[in-house]
């Protein structure tokens, strides 16, 4: 009797596996990397994986949330280095639970939230983000009309470098950043070439050198950023943003919009994340808060954890409101 | 490119140089006449790219309902993922005391106390560098990849060793696999196996399998035929001969196969972090995206240490007498080491204690900043001069020349250097690149490769000749070359990045230091191989050392030098493509962008294919030395 039951179960199980096939989703991948680390930190409430995108403002937010998750709620936090768009795919494979600062990405939202339903929005971070083209202030002082994109071609020769050939150079950051640069140059008929610096650090260093040594530089940058309080930069005016002018990425000929930065979490984390999910959802701070932490991390030699600790100790009223009851 | 060209047998009355010069003049004239026409400018929205991007979208949408994925590819992913999990869980469960003890024990068995000390020190270094967890992840990934490589590679290798027909069939496949730059593997794998640890392990496995097959085949086929015959005449079956005679006798060489497989896996595992594989590669990417050498350096050092420890362990196994059994004392000590490590697991914390780590991030960053500030004028001058005098003119030459002229030039050069068949292959590759829509970027990458190869050869010849002429200098240089060849390619980006920031020149510099060691070695060996009698004859006939070198040694070492050129080019290409991460642009950057921006996936994928074609093309052009061993068997050449 028992044997027959077992055999029946076995057959049922096999057919279930056979018919179902193997799918790629959070259920299979999620437990994988967590297994080792959750075992190592016994008594942990669980593991939260916050993807790290490569700019320091993002890291500041991620580190403060990670600090609170670890110290206040007893979670283990992993901060894997995964770039913006790959991180969205990570929701599907289980490699990522949280993107703490998302810059728009309406196409990914449509695909992963509306269609695949593996992710969802977990509210605003409170940060207002805007991307733009910048020049050091001395250039705007010297050539007042340079801040209008219509005059950029006139000054293109100023921005020539060994990497841009006979065109002006527009310095770009990490290859993974949100970017309309190629389309803008093409559609606004600018005599410029995008040169990829490869990192936020390359942009910052370029901007600082340009202002200090009075060297010409046109570069991609974004606010919130601590750099604005240290180096005088002026934004170049592109055609004003209107609703929907960036709908077709190939035809963009307008400036970037001001974005309400938000948090994205995997559906699985939203359902089973418990207090960790609540904390991530409640997290909300200002551009000044983020800049303070980011500044400490970049310029005052602090690790992410130290900078987060400093902010947390200085601003108890703010973060206590995020802690779920 | 067009300066070296076809020669026809010199006719009476014409000097020998007339034909090549004539052809070169014809090329120059054609260039001046047709410049700017027939160019193939880069278009990010090329239909070829969009088609691949769409394919990817389709696969993403159907990953969980298409039968190919549901019943085949996803199971592979699950299996490899499970294996990785098992490795990782085991290593984490051992904790650092356990891992240290077990590694120490294995190393003792492999090669006695020296190797054991090295292993224990090396493993502890991961902790001291503050990279315990990343190192364990990398170790697990390498473990999975090597295990799978050997599980597939050794049987295939044995088969190839026994049957020359199989060997002939797989050799070209392995050739292409070994010319393929590491970057090119990633996009197809992301397509079929998604991202994360399993995809990373599979990529690493595919990359590290060729030496496993090749060297195993070599080992099995080299077993002395008398031994095989003896066993056969004693009535052993084929299987008995294989398992009792061939494999045991082939053991030392098999250890080399494992060694090479591990080394290849280590150099790939870092790059696999571009598709979100965990481990030390993540730290290097982190450093790259912060432009902080201080973050990258410890991770680079950890990888080198891992490579050195595993290399020495496997080399010790390879060197051991195949008939000796481990002595009881060694077994006891190894057992004691392992037991001590295991016993300490519950006592010591599993995570490396933070008080014992040394963080050098700030110091290294400061040092780099100092170097940048103080050497800036020199490095900037080198970079700008090279860019303006060499890179930019050559690049505009190649990109403004009509495609058919470049194709003709490639055909002519390849025909002259390597003969008709390789020339046609090279031409086919180039035309395929044109059809793929990445012509302009390929020309840019070729420019960078050309400049890097020129410098590499100049330096390599110089050092190689010096070493061949002075045994003392050679003895000094050997260990450096050995160390340099154990290091994964990625590590070379660090000093380059520190000195030259993110530009094309950074990639050139990195590929020079990557490719110089094997070139030096080949040149040195080539010159040494010139028979002593010939040298003596030349000397007694009254040639000066200079004449001896130019008229006797270099011409006679021509084949070795051609081989060095060939390997230098293949290695340089691999590095220049990786240089896309640090500002080299062109094809390498397209691959990086393909992983960063979903809309560029198609372009990245196609660029990956183009790098393979470019690799095959450059290889065929310079294949002059007929039986060309693969570039990565460099230790045995």
Image (cartoon, coloured by chain):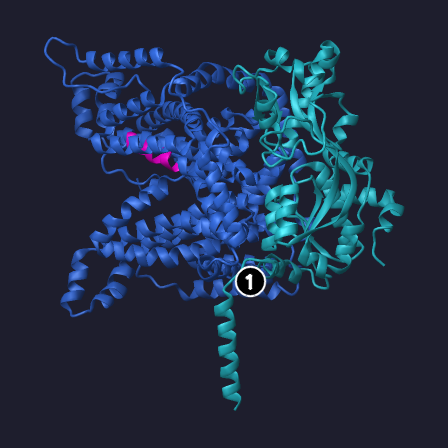
Chain colours: A cyan, B blue
Where residue B331 appears, as percent x and y from the top left, is: 44, 65
Magenta span: predominant SS is helix
Q: Is residue B385 magenta?
A: no
Left or right of residue B396, residue A136 in this image: right
Task: Using the image, name the chain to which the residue with label 1 belongs.
Answer: B
With respect to residue A244, does B356 lie above or below? below
The image quarter in which residue B36 lies: top left
SS at badge 1 = helix
Q: Is residue B49 above or below residue B104?
A: above
Kindly identify the residue that appears in the image at 46 percent across and 40 percent down.
Answer: B51
> In the image shown, does A315 or B380 lie closer to the viewer?
A315
Left-right relation of B240 to B314 = left
Residue B439 place in picture, x, y as percent: 41, 28
Most extreme residue toward the left, as rendered?
B12
Which one is in front, B587 or B35? B35
**Range of magenta residues:** B612-622
- Name the residue at 52% across, 19% down: B383
Image quarter where the N terminus of chain B lies is top left
**Residue B194 on image: x %, y %:** 52, 51
**Which class describes the residues within 10 Å of circle 1: few (<14), some (14-19), or many (20+)?**
some
Which residue lies under the disc numbered 1? B90
Task: Judge whether residue B298 can be spotted in this image.
Answer: no
- B625 with respect to B473 (left or right): left
Quadrant (top left/top right/bottom left/bottom right) for the C terminus of chain B: top left
Q: Position of residue A152 (x, y in %)?
A: 64, 15
Q: Is residue B508 visible?
A: yes
Camera-nearest residue between A84 and B86: A84
Residue sitting at the far bottom? A1
């Amino acid at each position: 009797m028992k044997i027959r039951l077992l055999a029946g179960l076995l057959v049922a199980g096999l057919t279930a596996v056979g018919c179902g096939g193997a799918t790629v989703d959070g259920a299979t991948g999620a437990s994988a990397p967590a297994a080792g680390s959750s075992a190592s930190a016994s008594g942990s409430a669980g593991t939260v994986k916050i993807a790290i995108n490569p700019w320091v403002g993002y890291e500041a937010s991620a580190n403060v949330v990670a600090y609170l998750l670890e110290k206040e709620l007893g979670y283990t936090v992993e901060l894997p280095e995964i770039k913006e768009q790959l991180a969205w795919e990570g929701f599907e494979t289980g490699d990522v639970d949280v993107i703490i600062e998302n810059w728009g990405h309406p196409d990914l939202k449509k695909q992963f939230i509306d269609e695949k339903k593996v992710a969802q929005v977990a509210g605003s971070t409170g940060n207002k983000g805007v991307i733009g083209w910048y020049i050091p202030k001395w250039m705007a002082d010297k050539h007042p009309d340079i801040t209008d994109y219509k005059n950029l071609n006139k000054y293109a020769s100023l921005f020539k470098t060994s990497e841009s050939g006979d065109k002006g150079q527009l310095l770009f950051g990490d290859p993974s950043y949100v970017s309309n640069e190629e389309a803008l140059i093409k559609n606004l008929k600018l005599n410029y070439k995008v040169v990829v610096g490869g990192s936020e650090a390359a942009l910052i260093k370029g901007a600082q050198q340009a202002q200090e040594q009075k060297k010409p530089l046109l570069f991609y940058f974004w606010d919130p950023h601590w750099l604005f309080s240290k180096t005088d930069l002026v934004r170049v005016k592109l055609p004003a943003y209107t609703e929907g002018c960036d709908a077709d990425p190939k035809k963009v000929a307008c400036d970037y919009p001001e974005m309400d930065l938000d948090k994205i979490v995997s559906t699985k984390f939203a359902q089973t994340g418990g207090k960790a999910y609540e904390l991530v959802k409640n997290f909300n701070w200002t551009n000044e808060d983020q800049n303070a932490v980011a500044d400490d991390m970049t310029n005052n030699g602090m690790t992410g954890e130290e900078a987060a600790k400093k902010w947390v100790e200085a601003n108890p009223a703010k973060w206590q409101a995020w802690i779920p009851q | 490119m067009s300066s070296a060209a076809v020669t026809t047998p010199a006719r009476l009355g014409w000097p020998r140089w007339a034909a090549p010069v004539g052809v070169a003049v014809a090329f120059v004239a054609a260039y001046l006449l047709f410049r700017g026409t027939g160019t193939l400018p880069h278009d990010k929205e090329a239909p070829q790219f969009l088609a691949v991007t769409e394919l990817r979208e389709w696969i993403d949408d159907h990953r969980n309902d298409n039968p190919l994925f549901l019943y085949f590819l996803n199971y592979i992913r699950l299996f490899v993922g499970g294996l990785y999990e098992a490795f990782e869980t085991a290593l984490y469960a051992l904790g650092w005391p356990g891992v240290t003890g077990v590694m120490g024990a294995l190393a003792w068995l492999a090669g006695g106390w020296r190797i054991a000390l090295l292993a224990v020190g090396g493993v502890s270094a991961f902790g001291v560098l503050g990279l315990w967890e990343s190192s364990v992840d990398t170790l697990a990934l390498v473990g999975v990849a090597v295990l799978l490589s050997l599980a597939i590679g050794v049987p295939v290798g044995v088969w190839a060793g026994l049957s020359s027909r199989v060997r002939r069939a797989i050799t070209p496949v392995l050739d292409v696999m070994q010319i393929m730059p590491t970057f090119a593997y990633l996009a197809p794998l992301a397509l079929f196996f998604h991202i994360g640890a399993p995809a990373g392990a599979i990529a690493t496995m595919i990359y590290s399998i060729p030496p496993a097959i090749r060297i195993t085949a070599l080992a099995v086929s080299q077993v002395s035929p008398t031994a095989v015959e003896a066993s056969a005449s004693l009535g052993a079956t084929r299987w008995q001969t294989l398992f009792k005679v061939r494999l045991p006798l082939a053991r030392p060489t098999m250890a080399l196969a494992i060694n090479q497989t591990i080394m290849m896996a280590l150099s790939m595992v870092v790059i696999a972090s571009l598709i979100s594989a965990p481990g030390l590669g993540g730290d290097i990417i982190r450093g790259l995206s912060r432009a902080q050498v201080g973050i990258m350096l410890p991770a680079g050092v950890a990888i080198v240490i891992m490579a050195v420890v595993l290399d020495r362990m496997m080399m010790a196994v390879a060197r051991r007498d195949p008939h000796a059994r481990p002595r009881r004392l060694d077994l006891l000590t190894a057992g004691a080491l392992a037991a001590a490590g295991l016993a300490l697991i519950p006592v010591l914390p599993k995570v490396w204690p933070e008080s014992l780590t040394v963080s050098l991030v700030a110091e290294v960053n400061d040092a780099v900043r100092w170097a940048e500030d103080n050497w800036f004028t020199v490095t900037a001058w080198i970079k700008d001069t090279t860019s303006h005098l060499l890179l930019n003119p050559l690049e505009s030459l190649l990109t403004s020349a009509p495609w058919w002229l470049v194709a003709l030039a490639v055909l002519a050069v390849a025909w002259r250097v390597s003969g008709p068949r390789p020339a046609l292959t090279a031409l086919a590759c180039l035309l395929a690149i044109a059809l793929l829509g990445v012509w302009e970027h390929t020309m840019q990458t070729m420019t960078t490769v050309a400049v890097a190869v020129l410098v590499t050869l100049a330096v390599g010849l110089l050092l190689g000749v010096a070493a061949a002429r002075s045994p003392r200098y050679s003895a000094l240089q050997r260990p450096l070359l050995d160390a340099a060849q154990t290091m994964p390619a990625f590590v070379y980006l660090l000093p380059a990045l520190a000195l030259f920031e993110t530009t094309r020149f950074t990639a050139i510099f990195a590929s020079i230091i990557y490719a110089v060691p094997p070139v030096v070695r080949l040149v040195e060996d080539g010159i040494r191989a010139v028979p002593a009698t010939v040298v003596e004859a030349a000397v007694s006939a009254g040639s000066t050392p200079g004449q001896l070198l130019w008229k006797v040694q270099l011409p006679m070492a021509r084949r070795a030098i051609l081989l060095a050129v060939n390997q230098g080019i293949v290695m340089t290409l691999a590095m220049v493509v990786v240089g896309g991460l640090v500002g080299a642009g062109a094809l390498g950057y397209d691959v990086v962008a393909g992983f960063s921006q979903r809309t560029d996936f198609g372009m990245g994928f196609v660029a990956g294919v183009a790098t393979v074609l470019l690799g095959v093309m450059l290889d065929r052009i310079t294949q002059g030395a007929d039986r060309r061993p693969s570039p990565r068997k460099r230790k045995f050449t």
